[in-house]
Amino acid sequence: MMKKTILFIVCLLFGLMFINAGLNKFLNYMPVPKDMPKTAMAMFGAIMQIKWLMPLVGTAEIIGGILVIIPRSRALGAVIIFPVMVGILLTVISLSSGLPMVLVLWAVLIWVIIENREKYLPMVR
């Protein structure tokens, strides 16, 4: 019972973080850090040139975040969040900052996937 409670709390925080990140892609309410490296600014500027990319990622973050919070749909939420997490990991590696936080997020995602592994078996058979 305790494990389920901890997993729910962790997934709630994980999901809320992704919902917040997704909403920010539409509403732009979080300020850009003033000390962001020039390489990061250049990369994000280039990404913003692809007009459909941020709305797509934001939508995936919002939907995936909601689904991860709900225990019954958590496995599907993890599948939706997975490619977003790959992008986050590659971005962080290329910028050489923020890796500890991303590794924590990956740990949560992997925990969710392991806890729901029986739901994924029909996809790999």
Image (tube, rainbow, N blue to C red):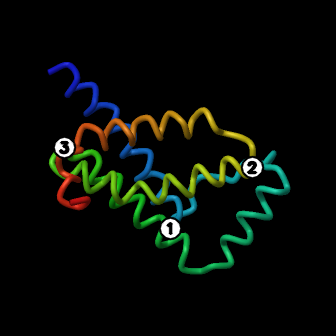
Pointer 2: residues within 10 angstroms few (<14), some, or many (20+)? some
Name the residue tied to disc 2: 95
- In three-dimensional space, the C-alpha distance between marks 3 and 1, rounded to whole angstroms, equals 26 Å
Q: Residue at x 40, y 55 (%)?
A: 81
Q: Residue at x 69, y 53 (%)?
A: 32
In the picture, the disc for residue 65 is: none
In the picture, the disc for residue 71 is: 3
Relative horizontal placement of residue 55, taking residue 59 as reference (left or right): right
- In three-dimensional space, the C-alpha distance between marks 2 and 3, rounded to whole angstroms, equals 34 Å
For the C terminus, the quadrant is bottom left
Q: Position of residue 29 (x, y in %)?
A: 56, 56
Q: Nearer the viewer, residue 11 or 114?
A: 114
Name the residue tied to disc 1: 26
Where disc 1 sits, the SS reads helix
Pointer 3: residues within 10 angstroms few (<14), some, or many (20+)? some
Relative horizontal placement of residue 1, taking residue 30 as reference (left or right): left
- Decide: marks 1, 2 in contact (CB < 8 A)? no
What amino acid is labelled 3 in the image? Answer: Pro
Q: Is residue 107 above or below residue 75?
A: above
Where disc 3 sits, the SS reads helix
